[in-house]
Amino acid sequence: MFVFYFDHIKVATMRKDVRILLVGEPKVGKTSLIMSLVSEEFPDEVPLRAEEITIPADVTPERVPTHIVDYSGTDTCTSLYDETHMACIAVLMSMPQASPKVLIPLLLNVLILLSCHRVPLILVGNKSDLVEHSSMETILPIMNQYSEIETCVECSAKNLKNISELFYYAQKAVLHPTGPLYSPEDKEMKPSCIKALTRIFKISDLDNDGILNDNELNFFQRTCFNIPLAPQALEDVKNVVRKNMSDGVKDNGLTLKGFLFLHTLFIQRGRHETTWTVLRRFGYDDDLELTQEYLFPLLKIPPDCTTELNHNAYLFLQSVFDKHDKDRDCALSPDELKDLFKVFPYMPWGPDVNNTVCTNEQGWITYQGYLSQWTLTTYLDVQRCLEYLGYLGYSIIQEQESQTAAVTITRNKRIDLQKKQTQRSVFLCNVLGARGSGKSGFLQAFLGRNLARQKRIREDHMSYYAMSTTYVYGQEKYLLLHEVLPDFEFLSEADLACDVVCLVYDISNPRSFEYCAKVYKKHLLDSKTPCVIIAAKSDLHEARQYYSLSPLDFCRKHKLHPPQMFTCNTDEAPSKDICTKLTTMAMYPAHKLPRILSALLVTVFTSFFFIFLLNIYLFVKNTLHMTQADLKNSTFWLRASVGATVFAVLGFAVYKALLKHR
């Protein structure tokens, strides 16, 4: 923002090239002007029209390739329309002695063509060497009347007067247009510009005290211009603000009003590039909208991989939370949350978020709930997460190329299964069950809400997701519970694609378990996804289920854990033990042993045990009739039998342990 102290700073631009179109009546000197620019001398012979000229980027002040197009009066109106469609800026040339009566009709015709494509315009009075007086007194009132006109220039192809300056102004009008920033009539910045700069101020105000202190100003300067600000230069800037605004500087720091005043001053002094450099560094395009490239950087996610936030991203989000938790109660009040999202164009979190993550007794999102919601967004919709991080200025504050630096893509789940270990931190549990079985109550209980608190939740604010942390062997993991709608016949692969499945039935409803049994047999019987059956509302009287097998017998038959009793009708927060078990099963999914392997283990054990008993019998029977050599040989086989039997017993014990774990 203080670029006027450093003229050599390279300015960031959005356009890759500039196309300048020269229009005007015949004989006004368009072609002569182009040829004088190229050869740096007035041409002796001038063709009817100059060929399109490209000026390389390395010889232009803004380091951008520039194309200059000469429009001939012999061209048709259609070609002029096509040229204005491709042009970045038009230069309307006239004779210096042209009167407004001649100039204005020509100007209006050009403006009609340019208005369709929002192309800026520069008025040029050429052949100034033919008159002794300046034509600015005639042109300036016309310029003030039409906001599309960026500036006015007098030049002479013969005397080489202001030729380089003309094309520099044309470049500048394209790369750093005044129109989106400033209203000459009102002599103040436009609302869209104020809005963008206000967001930039809030992002740069790292401690959220409403003031940019010296450290924050230096960080801002280095971020935008790659050059630190000298202490004396910083004081000079603050002194300029103090002289013009009583509340522009506070506690020796720059306020929002002072920040906006400085940019107004830059624009009024013709230093639009300073403001545009700041805007573009923070992701804005020529219309002062955040670009798609900034908000949605490319991120390719292979199949069967998930997305999680990395450690640096969590540190950034923690700093954002601390920045807005002004009362330090580890929760964000509605006002604090609103202040946090002021850098967004809309409110991204609705009332359902408060019922998706942990809140305090007042219903405010806690620190844990805040991180859980970000984790959930990253897992379910990583593009939305990148957009949100863009609004918060992640790539600027963290000095990264884009928000993708905040995301970790986990490896394919099949590799985790092969290696029997995972590095993931987020696990998805789909919760299925008949209507009224207690699925929603189970989700809310995971967030620490008993039945009394759940009854205070509005039905239209309920959420089909619940995200919180659990601890598995001392490691903090995130478990995401997703309530799947109970349309048994229409369950899709997406409804069953998860790390663990939870089937919920109401023990007081005799027809509730049948749904769980049918879902398991139709969709999960041959699946490798772990499954747990939960007997919800266990505080009520248990009814006999109208199914061929009881829930316990069903679990035994299919080698599942016995039904897990659960209720949220408690005085305190419900237990999270079941959720810890679900997370553990998701981390270490146990697969059924093949039946042939089970049979083989049983056969081996039985065979070795039979051989062991036979050898004992023979050893006892023949001991009294053996020689010393026979006795040694028999003892050897007895020891071998004992060893083999012990091996078989240990193998069978491992097999039973695996079944128990299952």
Image (tube, rainbow, N blue to C red):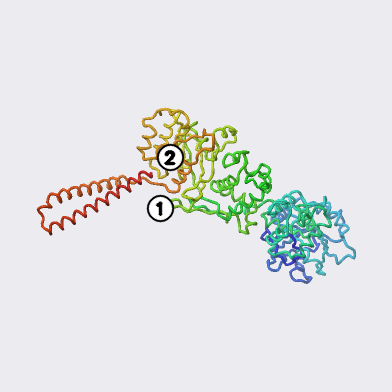
Q: Nearer the viewer, residue 634 or 393?
A: 634
Out of 85 and 356, give the one closest to the viewer.
356
Near mark 1 (Cα within 10 A), the count class, few <14, some 14-19 or many ≥20, is: few
Residue 482's disc is: none
Instruction: Identify the residue under disc 2.
Output: 532
Q: Amino acid at mark 2?
A: Val
CA neighbours of label 2 inside 10 A, class few (<14), some (14 to 19), many (20+): many
> To which residue does mark 1 refer?
418
Residue 127, compared with residue 576, is above or below; it is: below
Name the side, left or right, on which 553 lies relative to 255.
left
Q: Is residue 93 visible?
A: no
- Taking the spot 63% from the left edge, 59% from the top edge, the residue there is 399
Q: CA distance from mark 1 to mark 2?
A: 22 Å
Q: Position of residue 312 (x, y in %)?
A: 58, 56
Q: The residue under label 1 is which amino acid type?
A: Gln
The answer to which image quadrant residue 138 occupies is bottom right
Q: Is residue 598 left or right of residue 256?
A: left
